[in-house]
Amino acid sequence: MIAAGVVFIIACESRPAVPIADADVTAGTASDTIRIDGSAGVRPLVEALAGGYSAQRPNTTILIGDGLGSTARVVAAAEGRIDIAMASHGVDMQDLRSRGLTAVEIARVAVVFGLHTSAGPVAVTEQQICDVYRGKIANWRELGGVDSPVVLLARPEGEVDGDVVAAGVPCFPAVGDMRGVRVLEQPDEMAAALADTPGAVGMTSLPFVQVSGGAFRVLAINGVEPTPANVLAGLHPLVRQSFLIISDDPAPAVRSFLAFVASDAGAAIMETGGAVPLRGTMLAPYP
């Protein structure tokens, strides 16, 4: 039996993921258990919120799954196999309404280029980051860093971080036009590679930088840091959305969690995690 009040992350590289439906049997009852799955890119933010909520509500167990695609997470929420689906793209409000679901946008998150700390202090323009990914700049010393080869990391086309960069940086090449790039399917794989690979650069989101504990850092573009103020002002245009998809009539435990997300405490957690919380009409507190 898992103790009440725990945030159970059903995701670990050292063991296969445990289906939420199976883990739920030993983690608690339907009334005190919240089952969450969906976008792996939104997961660090939700994990932080779940940890803060569990500290206040020790009788609630939160299960966070290993990730579900755009269609699978909506189906799982509609069928009641999960209580909350995490999403950052592919949110079709009309389709959700037809399934008895709704999407609540809780935050905006900066998409950034992460840089392995071995590259040294580096400053780049938008054109220079495009030249890096086109193979025209192959060593960080060309940009004021140390004498270290550039190691290119990218997300697949169709994944949120890569698509946000492609839309926001007009000169950025398609993955097929990048020379010697290593394509990483999952956001946590990107974060691990940025932390472990000298000279590496790759697109990620700010919460992954924050939770790395300094294992890699942000590469500012055109001198603009991805701070919440710069995101809100539109100075850092590379931004992804963070949604929670829920039933139109959520269970009391889910309502309570959403109220926490909308509270000052929830906003503080999101800000600490590098996100810009959305308040007021964008996220109405639940009773």
Image (cartoon, helix red, strand yellow):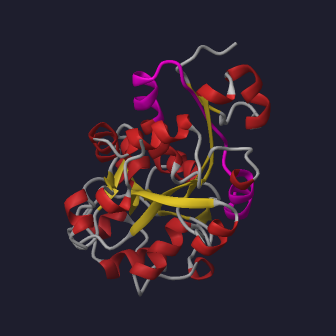
Q: Residue 178 appears at what percent x and percent y?
A: 56, 77
Question: In the image, what residue occupies the spot 72% across and 55% down?
Answer: 78
Indicate the position of residue 213 as horizontal and vertical percent values.
37, 37
Q: Is residue 245 magenta?
A: no
* Magenta region: 50-76
Q: Nearer the viewer, residue 167 or 42?
A: 42
Image mark count: 0
Quick one: which residue is furthest to the right in this view? 22
Front one among 17 and 266: 266
Observer able to see residue 44: yes
Compared to 223, does 21 lie above or below? above
Task: Reply above or below: 151 against 177.
Answer: above
Is residue 207 placed above or below 112 in the rendered structure? above
Indicate the position of residue 5 as horizontal and vertical percent values: 52, 20
Please identify the quarter of the rendering in which residue 95 is found. Answer: bottom right
Residue beneath the point at 69% across and 31% down: 14
